Image (cartoon, coloured by chain):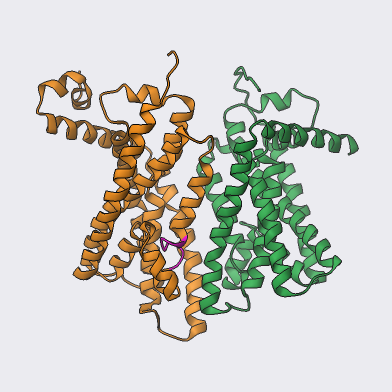
Chain colours: A green, B orange
Amino acid sequence: MGRQLSFLLALWKTNLLSAMEYRVSFLTQVVGMMLNNALYFVFWIIFFARFEEINGWDLVDMLFLFGVVATGFGAGTYLFGNAIRLSSLIAEGLMDYYLSLPRPVLLHALASRSNASSAGDFTYGLFSFGAAIYFSGSFNGLMLLRFALGCLAAMAVLVSFLVLVQSLTFWIGNTSLLTASAFNAIVTFSLYPITLFDGTAKLVLFTLIPAAFIGALPAEFVRKFDLLQLVQICAGGAIFLLLAVFVFYRGLCRYESGSAIQVRM
Amino acid sequence: MRSREADVLSPESRVRGPAAAAVVGKYWAIFRTQLVNSLAYPIDLLGRSLAIVLFMWIFMNLWRVTYGATGASSIAGLTLADTMWYLMMAEAVMLSKRDLSETISEQVKDGSVAYLLNKPFNFILYHFAAGLGHSLLSFGGNLLIGSGIVWLMVGPPPGIMGWLFAGVAVALSWLLDFCFSTLIGLSAFVVEETNAFRWIYQKFLLLLGGVLIPLDFFPAWLQTISLNLPFAWIIYGPARLFVDPSLARLGQVLLQQGIWLAVFGGIVWVTYRRAVARLVINGG
């Protein structure tokens, strides 16, 4: 465990040093993404200025929601950047490199790349959480702990979901369209109040497209402690993580090498 | 066998044939090639159009709850059905427009712009013709699927005039959007990273363009600002015309689109000339 952790830390350090070679590009993407998210949030400011609340959700709830989703999404796609391009690694036979080294294949493949813009999402999420605390007027150390836990669970479910969907590449070949649709669906649904959706839709959001575990559920938990929600968050994160690892390694048995010469720079 | 495309693309045909016809002909050939190329993958085309189902479903839930909470049958003159048809048209335009900024900026950064610049066509018009070929089919797919789902949710669409007027405005929307995409792409001649510009432009369209919410729902001061910016005439103009197809509104939309096209078309032309002048190509 300790060995894998130090391996991960070494990968993340390498990714960061690599990004720092293009400092201006990195910073442009970070600041650009923060502005991008802030502009998107203006929609909710305009919306709630006119309609005040929808099914019990108000602007402060949305700040908590954006805080958790952006932080979890940013951390997940920064630290495990290949989670959004795993299908092309599989389809193009680029897993050979990871298979030939004595390290866990999935962990190595996912953490080998970092997305600069994701650092912007992560930072924006922290600002959004800060704004949520300011406007809700309630803060204590436990809330900070709940936020960390909520973001960790959101990150685990998001990365696991992406791995699960893209692992289908082992069986059905090109899944670029499916991956893009699944990615769009989970991010879009996670940024809306869960109270908008009825029973069947809610079931979908907890299972097939687990957006509730990335957005609404951890956001509500961060705002107010609830034992049932704590159990749901932890169970959701653990189940999706185990399922993703299981399906990926089952699929890996079917992997066909492209025998292409690969150069890593 | 020589195809018609090869004829119109070859430099000698430019010299032989009437100049205007040859110019139109070669861009028509590029447009047709892209159209045929997109038609070669119908399932992919249909699959990409499914995104509109997701957005319409979320919008339906959001606005049904919102209209229910206010208890009013219409908000700012729009009923729930009007709002949903407006959003369908707005999303169809948004999802089908070809974002050429990434393509152009990649061509500038990796140097392949040099390969396109020495061809017997204008670099900018080449991208526009190719983008239009893609957008047209994509728009058709989005309209078909989007209309189907919205019809099921809120009832029949606006009358035939709405479709006709919106169709004209959408064509000019793509042209205006193309100007912005080209400017963002050409900025790669000056700055290293253009992604941030692209994201922010898209968010301006979502918000000030009226993709997420009709501008009629904005507070008066923000509505005034939005209507005086070009983004509204890329999305809001055609979509609002679709649900309220009056001649007065058509005139207003076309006038605004014409003004902004003249402004940004000019900026694109000047920027392109300057960018090409400072381009340095080493070797081949």
Q: Which residue lies furthest to the right in this view?
A: A2
- In which quarter of the view is residue B260 placed? bottom left
Q: B205 or B55: which is nearer to us?
A: B205
Q: In this view, does B38 lie to the left or right of B120?
A: right
Where does the image place residue B2, in percent across and percent down from the top left?
19, 20
Per the picture, the main secondary structure of the magenta-coloured stretch is: loop
Q: Which residue is drawn at 23% across and 34% down?
A: B27
Q: A235 or A85: which is nearer to us?
A: A85
Q: In this view, does B281 lie to the left or right of A109?
A: left
Q: A114 or B19: which is nearer to us?
A: B19
Q: Can residue B135 be seen in this view?
A: yes
Q: In this view, does A68 lie to the left or right of B213?
A: right
Using the image, determine if residue B123 lies above or below residue B70: above
Where does the image place residue A123, in percent across and percent down from the top left?
69, 52
Q: In this view, does B154 lie to the left or right of B199?
A: left
Q: Residue at x 63, y 23 (%)?
A: A257
Where does the image place residue B193, in percent across and percent down from the top left?
54, 38
On-image quarter of the C terminus of chain B: top left
Where does the image place residue B55, in percent across and percent down from the top left?
48, 60
Judge whether residue A74 is colored magenta.
no
- In which quarter of the view is residue B107 placed? top left
Q: Residue at x 76, y 48 (%)?
A: A242
Range of magenta residues: B207-213
Q: Can residue A158 be seen in this view?
A: no
Using the image, determine if residue A49 lies above or below residue B170: below
Judge whether residue B212 is colored magenta.
yes
Q: Residue at x 39, y 23 (%)?
A: B114
